[in-house]
């Protein structure tokens, strides 16, 4: 067998190199490579050669015998003849006129089954699940030691041997074992993907650079790999940052849900307290109303009963007089008649019943008075609400706002930190910017809000007149206008006449004590605006169902200093202090 293989080698070796260069089918490359490996097997012991297929050099798998007496794996010899025009023996080159009928050598098969496995695998590891298998091995596959980027085949140590010995195969590029080698071939040109197009960011072969990617900058895969690998650190850091941000968002959402549940529990408790008291008052109001009606009815019934009794008594007296008159009329004794008639001259005392009547009681206004009492009770219960807890809840939405000098009326003076404003008594010469108020002494903050909730506090101490709240962005800043929600103003106005929420009509807000600091809370999405007396920690007024469709700006107006007394004190945007 060794002699015939050596005799065949020069001619077959040239075919191997040529077929490799022209990128023939993988099977051709594999078969020719395996013929070279057959020559190498001649150096092994005779006993081992007799159990190895001359084509694949592996332990026989379903060995069959040709008419010339040589043994091969059924699969190997079948594939070999499928690729040949003439049918010949790969070992002795004997030609056959027709394709031989292969038959199993029963005795030889039994010997192979007994000794073949130990001969083939005694020095090479079998493939593990995480390993790349040898593409040439049949039957039990061995672990691949290298992959050839020219053959696109992975080889175990035995099948790799020709790549270390044959001159043409030595030029092949061997790499660490890798699977899916077909993916490394260009689908269009059937050439190895060795370059990277930086324009289209894809892997290309040499032919691609001469056609579709001719004008594109390309670099070797290793060079681009190093560039991309260097970028992985930055990408990983960015991904970690994104993950941390989203984890923070998750925690913030969970915290918001937790706060919402706590707020809901408090709201339910407050509601139960007030509504339970209200229901008790309603029940009492109903009882009082029913009792009042019953008392009126009882009085009327008593009056009627007394009158009936009095009438019955008069009827009885008159009946007795009638009987006396009848008896007297029947007497013939003149003396007795005249003596008795004298006593009939004075009739029994009776009432003038023409002016007497029983009037049904009037229940008009009874229900109204009961409802008025109920309303008074409800107001008292409302005042018992825990305003301090409510104020603490809204104070958590504090925002840091500063006054915008580009919106301030020329009479106004702003502090450098943008937290205070007062009327200076002198009109400054300022550019008439579109945002500036020119008719009224108003000023807005730099910050606006288009969603969510926000809260801020303004010190109004020592001022006799002031106005504050929120306004929408599109308000008229140059001409006279009404400061109502319809025109974009949601504001409180204070003067010596008291506190008023400006609306149409305006709503007077009761005060318990002199205001020192006012808190303003807005829930944009719910359309809610609330004002609080921060020092007394009580709720002042809420406007509900507001239509907020534009950015809202906190609004302050210190009003001229000479307006209704000394009004020179500033309005001051103050930081929230929940321990006040």
Image (tube, grey):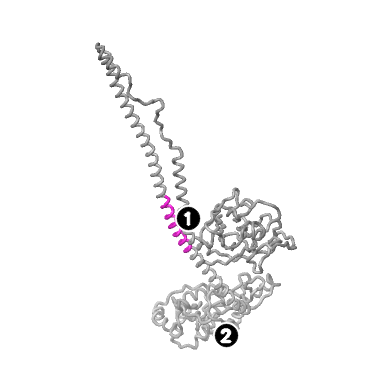
* Mark 2 in CB contact with mark 1 (< 8 angstroms): no
Q: Is residue 276 magenta?
A: yes
The stretch in magenta equals 257-278
Q: State the image coordinates of residue 78 (x, y, percent, origin top left).
A: 50, 73
Q: Determine whether 335 is above or below 184 in the image.
A: above
Q: State the image coordinates of residue 24 (x, y, percent, origin top left).
A: 60, 74
Task: State how many labels appear.
Answer: 2
Q: Which residue is drawn at 47% across and 88% down?
A: 44
State the image quarter where residue 400 is shown: bottom right
Q: Is any atom of residue 536 visible in this view?
A: yes
Q: Tell which of 550 and 206 is nearer to you.
A: 550
Numbered circle sitting on residue 383: 1
Q: Determine whether 495 is above or below 251 in the image.
A: above
Does dot 1 land on a helix, a strand or a loop? Answer: helix
Q: Which residue is drawn at 64% across and 69% down?
A: 417
Q: Determine whether 562 is above or below 12 in the image.
A: above
Numbered circle sitting on residue 7: none
Q: Which SS does the magenta portion mostly show?
A: helix
State the image quarter where residue 366 is shown: top left
In this image, 338 relative to 293: left or right? left
Q: Mark 2 or mark 1, which has the lower sequence index?
A: 2
State the image quarter where residue 359 is shown: top left
Q: Tell which of 402 and 239 is nearer to you.
A: 402
Q: Name the residue under label 2.
A: 166
Q: Is any atom of residue 66 visible in this view?
A: no
Classify 10 Å Cα crowding around label 1: few (below 14), some (14-19), many (20 and above).
few
Q: Determine whether 233 is above or below 451 in the image.
A: below
Q: State the image coordinates of residue 196 (x, y, percent, origin top left).
A: 64, 75
Q: Tell which of 367 and 515 is nearer to you.
A: 515
Q: State the image coordinates of residue 91 (x, y, percent, origin top left).
A: 51, 81
Disc 2 to disc 1, C-alpha distance: 102 Å
Q: Which residue is drawn at 45% across and 62% down?
A: 262
């Amino acid at each position: 067998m060794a002699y015939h293989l050596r005799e065949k080698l020069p001619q077959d070796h040239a075919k191997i190199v040529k077929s490799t260069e022209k990128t023939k089918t993988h099977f051709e490359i594999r078969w020719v490579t395996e013929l070279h490996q057959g020559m190498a097997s001649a150096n092994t012991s005779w006993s081992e050669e007799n159990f190895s297929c001359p084509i694949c050099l592996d332990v026989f798998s379903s060995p069959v015998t040709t008419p010339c007496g040589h043994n091969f794996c059924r699969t190997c010899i079948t594939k070999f003849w499928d690729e040949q025009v003439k049918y010949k023996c790969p070992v002795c080159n004997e030609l056959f006129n027709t394709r031989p009928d292969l038959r199993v050598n029963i005795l030889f098969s039994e010997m192979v089954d007994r000794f073949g496995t130990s001969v083939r695998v005694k020095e090479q590891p079998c493939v593990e699940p995480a390993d790349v298998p040898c593409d040439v091995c049949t039957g039990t596959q061995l672990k691949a030691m290298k992959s050839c980027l020219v053959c696109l085949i992975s080889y175990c140590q035995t099948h790799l041997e020709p790549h270390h010995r044959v001159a043409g195969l030595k030029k092949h590029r061997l790499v660490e074992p890798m699977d899916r080698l077909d993916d490394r071939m260009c689908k269009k040109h059937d050439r190895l993907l060795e370059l990277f197009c930086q324009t289209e960011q894809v892997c290309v072969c040499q032919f691609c650079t001469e056609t579709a990617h001719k004008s594109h900058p390309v670099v070797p895969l290793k060079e681009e790999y190093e560039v991309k690998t260097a970028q992985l650190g930055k990408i990983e850091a960015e991904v970690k940052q994104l993950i941390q941000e989203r984890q923070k968002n998750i925690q913030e959402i969970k915290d918001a849900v937790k706060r919402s549940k706590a707020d809901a529990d408090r709201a339910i408790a407050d509601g139960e307290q007030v509504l339970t008291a209200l229901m008790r008052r309603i029940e009492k109001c109903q009882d009082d109303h029913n009792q009042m009606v019953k008392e009126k009815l009882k009085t009327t019934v008593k009056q009627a009963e007394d009158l009936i009794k009095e009438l019955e008594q008069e009827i009885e007296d008159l009946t007795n007089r009638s009987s006396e008159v009848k008896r007297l009329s029947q007497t013939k004794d003149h003396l007795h008649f005249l003596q008795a008639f004298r006593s009939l001259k004075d009739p029994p005392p009776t009432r003038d019943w023409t002016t007497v009547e029983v009037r049904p009681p009037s229940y008009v206004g009874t229900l109204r008075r009961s409802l008025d009492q109920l309303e008074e009770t409800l107001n008292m219960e409302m005042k018992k609400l825990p305003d301090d807890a409510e104020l603490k809840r809204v104070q958590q939405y504090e925002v840091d706002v500063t006054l915008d000098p580009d919106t301030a009326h020329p009479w106004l003076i702003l502090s450098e930190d943008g937290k205070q404003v007062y009327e200076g008594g002198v009109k400054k010469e300022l550019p008439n910017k579109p945002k500036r108020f020119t008719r009224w002494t108003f000023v807005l903050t730099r910050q606006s809000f288009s969603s969510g909730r926000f809260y801020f506090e303004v010190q109004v101490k020592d001022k006799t007149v002031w106005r504050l709240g929120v306004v929408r962005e599109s308000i008229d800043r140059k001409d006279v206008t009404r400061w109502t929600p319809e025109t974009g103003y949601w504001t409180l106005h204070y003067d010596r006449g008291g506190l008023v929420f400006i609306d149409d009509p305006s709503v007077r807000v009761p005060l318990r004590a002199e205001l020192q600091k006012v808190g303003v809370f807005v829930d944009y999405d719910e359309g809610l605006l609330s004002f609080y007396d921060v020092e007394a920690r009580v709720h002042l007024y809420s406007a509900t169902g507001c239509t907020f469709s534009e950015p809202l700006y906190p609004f302050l107006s210190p009003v001229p200093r000479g307006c209704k007394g000394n009004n020179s004190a500033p309005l001051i945007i103050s930081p929230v202090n929940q321990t006040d």
